């Protein structure tokens, strides 16, 4: 058979290379059909970051926050006051001869309030920016996950097509043996059933690829069903160093968001505290004396007296919020540390499983299926025993694809958690 001959001709190559070549032996028809829609990981991430439906919303949110910052830094307009005294009374104040007219302006001295409002608006902007970076990281990671899923399903389709080609050759072998009276008709029935199962498997993976293409292209607002992912599912990055990964946690997008939320929480307390305080005020104006036809300047200055209990209570709230700001960041950092350590252990285990499959299990099963084929042709094994060895080999290859996909997904999640982008 083709696959048997291929493995035998590659016997002088390293074991792991032998099976990497084996996995890419069959080039399916859909690859040439989809060639014009071939995409790479960096390309789909770039498309998603430019065309994702939720990305455009952020520019409008930033514009809104910028307007709030400008408004927060503006003082309340001065109050213009006009007062009339000593007019339209009795005796000497009858008429307007003794009238005094004062035109003045009054300003609130709200420097602390403006500073608190500006800081509150700036904290809102920092939180918005932090949330935007978290969403960009999530979109990048999710797009990469969908790409890896598409790439893995392509490999599964190739494996199913290869198994289907094997089943056709096996059916021909059994047909000749039945015709020669060397095998029972039951073997032929079982082989035809196995062939039908593989045809269904090929059909199923074809549908899965269309669905995977739709999900991936939806990341940039499209609806494509024939994307082809270019890449090598069995090409991995070196295992991450635990210490290096932990050092990255201090600047992760999610931790920065927690810090920004805590800063906004603190700024809200300061704003409430300052707004509760009665502001000082100052005024100045011009007074006219009708009886002497003279003018004079007037000025006023207002200072609130007495302790403001509400202000004092809110000030205590500000102090509590400052303490909570530090604690919330520490709690989230601890959670990130646990998740990162768990992912590192999963990565190490997945790599170990992949190495065991490629270096030990697959070579052993491949050798066993070749021996089983010879034993069947010599009448030493029945069809069921022979088929069992082939299915074990196919299942091991399926598991290799599953573990490779899982390892890539773990890498992507690690990148998302630690805020790195070297994978993409």
Image (cartoon, rainbow, N blue to C red):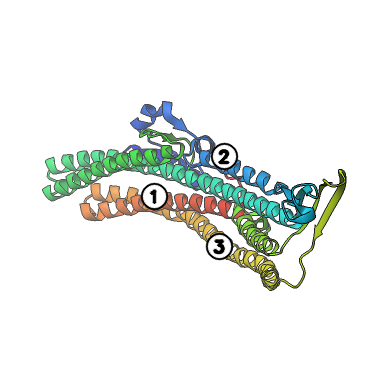
Please indicate whether residue 409 sits to the left or right of residue 390 in the image. Answer: right
Give me the residue at 28% from left, 43% from top: 204
Res. 129 mark: none
Please indicate whether residue 26 sits to the left or right of residue 418 in the image. Answer: left
Question: Which numbered mark, 1 or 3, is in the foreground of this view?
Answer: 3
Q: Is residue 246 above or below residue 25?
A: below
Is tag 1's residue or tag 3's residue first in the polypeptide sequence? Answer: 3
State which quarter of the image contains the C terminus.
Answer: top right
Work out whether residue 305 or residue 383 is closer to the camera in this orientation and state it. Answer: 305
Q: Which residue is mark 1?
A: 397
Label 1, label 2: how far apart the Cα atoms are: 47 Å
The x, y position of residue 114, in whole percent, is 72, 53
Work out whether residue 299 or residue 143 is closer to the camera in this orientation and state it. Answer: 299
Residue 18 appears in the figure: no
How many numbered discs sit on the rendered protein?
3
Q: Secondary structure at mark 1?
A: helix
Question: Which numbered mark, 1 or 2, is in the foreground of this view?
Answer: 2
The x, y position of residue 179, in whole percent, is 12, 40
Q: Which residue is mark 2?
A: 59
Say if mark 1 contacts mark 3, CB within 8 Å. Answer: no
Residue 188 appears in the figure: yes
Q: Secondary structure at mark 2?
A: helix
Question: Which numbered mark, 2 or 3, is in the foreground of this view?
Answer: 2
Q: Which residue is mark 3?
A: 339
The x, y position of residue 7, in whole percent, is 41, 42
Give me the residue at 48% from left, 54% from top: 354
Please indicate whether residue 155 sits to the left or right of residue 48 in the image. Answer: left
């Amino acid at each position: 058979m083709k696959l048997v001959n291929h493995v035998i001709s590659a016997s002088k190559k390293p074991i792991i290379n032998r099976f990497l070549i084996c996995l890419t032996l069959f080039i399916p028809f859909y690859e040439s059909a989809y060639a014009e829609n071939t995409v790479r990981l960096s390309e789909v991430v770039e498309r998603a970051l430019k065309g994702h439906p939720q990305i455009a919303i952020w520019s409008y949110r930033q514009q809104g926050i910028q307007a709030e910052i400008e408004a927060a830094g503006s003082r309340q307009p001065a109050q213009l006051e006009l007062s009339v005294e000593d007019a339209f009374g009795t005796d000497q104040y009858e008429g307007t001869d003794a009238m005094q007219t004062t035109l003045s302006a009054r300003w609130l001295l709200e420097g602390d309030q403006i500073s608190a409002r500006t800081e509150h608006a700036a904290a809102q902007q920092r939180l918005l920016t932090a949330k935007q970076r978290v969403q960009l990281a999530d979109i990048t990671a999710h797009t990469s996950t969908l790409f890896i899923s598409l790439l893995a399903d392509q490999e599964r389709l190739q494996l199913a097509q290869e198994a289907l080609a094997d089943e056709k050759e096996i059916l021909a072998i059994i047909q000749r043996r039945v015709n020669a009276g060397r095998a029972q008709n039951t073997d032929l029935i079982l082989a035809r059933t196995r062939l039908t199962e593989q045809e269904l498997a090929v059909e199923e993976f074809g549908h899965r690829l269309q669905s995977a293409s739709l999900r991936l292209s939806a990341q940039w607002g499209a609806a494509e069903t024939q994307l082809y992912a270019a890449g090598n599912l069995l090409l991995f990055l070196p295992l991450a160093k635990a210490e290096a990964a932990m050092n990255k946690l201090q600047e992760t997008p999610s931790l920065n968001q927690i810090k920004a939320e805590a800063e906004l929480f603190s700024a809200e307390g300061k704003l409430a505290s300052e707004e509760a305080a009665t502001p000082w005020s100052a005024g100045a104006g011009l007074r006219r004396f009708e009886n002497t036809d003279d003018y004079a300047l007037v000025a006023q200055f207002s200072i609130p007296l007495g302790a403001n209990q509400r202000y004092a209570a809110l000030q205590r709230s500000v102090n509590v919020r400052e303490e909570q700001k530090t604690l919330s960041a520490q709690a989230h950092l601890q959670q990130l540390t646990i998740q990162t350590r768990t992912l590192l252990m999963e990565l190490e285990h997945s790599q170990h499983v992949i190495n065991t499959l490629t270096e030990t299990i697959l070579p052993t099963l491949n050798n066993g299926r070749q021996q089983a084929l010879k034993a069947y042709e010599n009448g030493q094994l029945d069809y069921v025993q022979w088929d069992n060895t082939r299915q074990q080999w196919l299942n091991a290859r399926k598991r290799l694809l599953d573990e490779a996909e899982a390892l890539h997904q773990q890498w992507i999640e690690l990148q998302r958690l630690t805020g790195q982008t070297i994978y993409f």
